[in-house]
Image (spheres, rainbow, N blue to C red):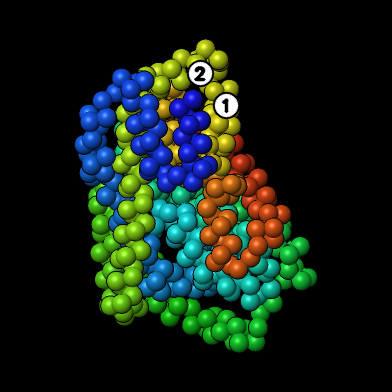
Amino acid sequence: MIVSSLLLLLVLGVPIAVAFALVVIANAEAWNIDPFSLAAMPFDTVSNFSLLAIPLFLLVGELMNRGGLVKQLTAVCDLFMSRIRAPMGHIMVMASALMGAITGSSVATVAAIGGTVGVEMRQRGYSKGYTAALNAASGLLGVLIPPSIPLILYGAIVGVSITNLFIASIVPGILTILVFSFIHSILSRRVLPDGKETLPASMAQERNDKTVNKGSVLVRALPALMLPILVLGGIYSGVFTATEAAAIAGVYALAVTVLTRQASAGDLKKILEHAALASAAILAIIAFTSIFNRAMILEQVPQSITEIATSFTGNPILFLLAINAALLLIGMFMETNAATLLMGPLLAPAAVNYGIDPVHFGVLLVTNIEIGLLTPPLAANLYVAQRTNEARLTEMFGYVMWFLLGSLLVLGMITFVPALTTWYQFL
């Protein structure tokens, strides 16, 4: 009843943060909850030090995109993949992974890479529909490749090490890269004339110049390449936390953008505005879902779910299959961050009761929900890729289905092979 009411409000178009708060207020009397006792909770929640990483990583993404650093990363990918058949599709996947390793946001990755790599893919003979489909699917790497904003949210609200979550998501991210690249290799034979990219004369000359000046391409891209190394290397070596890494990355990206004169003062103002607005939207959702989650705890909903799950089956595999089905459905109707904040605290206790590692379950939960970015009606990645690549949804669906199946394959591997996420515990 509670979840169905929430879903109804979301379907009716009520803003996500408002919908969470309304459900609690409307049921406060029935739940014997004093609304005034929850007044300070939104502020207390967003004051969590770990959540500071979200606006900082979003700022880094804006600086990367508008400061020209994304083009430098794309040039490096092109440098090493130019001899592979249908290279631009592989470049789309790899550039999305690199962007995800910096921003932690799927939608930001789709917008940034679609506006750079997507343009060149269309110039080389790919249809708008296929380009947009690959762009939308590759955007999932913005969530799977650490750092990941949904994983930060899960770790903060469930009480799991965010660093361990980042480490655990590395292998699933690599698997997704390999699966998407394999699918592209097959589909490119069908979507390209004679299965080969068409390279205009001007672009062919540029390619030749890049081949001769590989060193200069790497030197120009060195500041952009150092950023993911700085972020991930610092986190995994234990030098600084994920939040501190976000702060360092923000200062670094800002310094590189200013020193290389990639953005004017007006551009910097727009960058800060976009990052602030995106951060405010996410933090508002976090603030008001905290009220909803507290109400669920007071009503002992997590305990009830655990009891129902354990009475339904004592087999952890069957439990995970049921959870996968439920989360895939929820991901179709709820925004990724909101769904993570809602389902994490509700389902994590039941998973632990089955002996499932909370880190493994966190990666599983986020992977499930982020697949919803490709599945209507919400499907944020599809809509952003559609606009960025000037395509129609009907042109995209036939291709998106293949990448959706690839995502489900990776999900199945994560579900049935826990070592893919818990491997770091054996070191």
Residue lying furthest right: 194
Using residue 319 as the reference point, say whether residue 35 is left or right of it. Answer: left
Is residue 60 visible from the viewing direction of this image?
A: no
To which quarter of the image does residue 254 belong? bottom left
Q: Is mark 2 on a helix, strand or loop?
A: helix
Task: Please tell me whether residue 355 is drawn above or below residue 377 in the rendered image.
Answer: above
Crowd class of label 1 (few under 14; some 14 to 19; many from 20; radius 10 Å): few
The residue drawn where x is 65% and y is 75% is 124
Question: Quick one: label 1 or label 2, which is nearer the N terminus?
Answer: 2
Mark 2 is surrounded, within 10 Å at the Cα level, by few (under 14), some (14 to 19) or many (20 or more) other residues, namely many
Rendered-image quadrant of the C terminus? top left
Mark linked to residue 322 = 1
Give me the disc on residue 309: 2
At horizontal 48% and vertical 41% (from top left) the residue drawn is 10
Q: Distance between the residues labelled 1 and 2?
A: 9 Å
Kindly identify the amino acid type of the residue bearing the numbered disc 2: Ala
Q: Nearer the viewer, residue 250 or 34?
A: 34
Residue 202 in sight from this viewpoint = yes
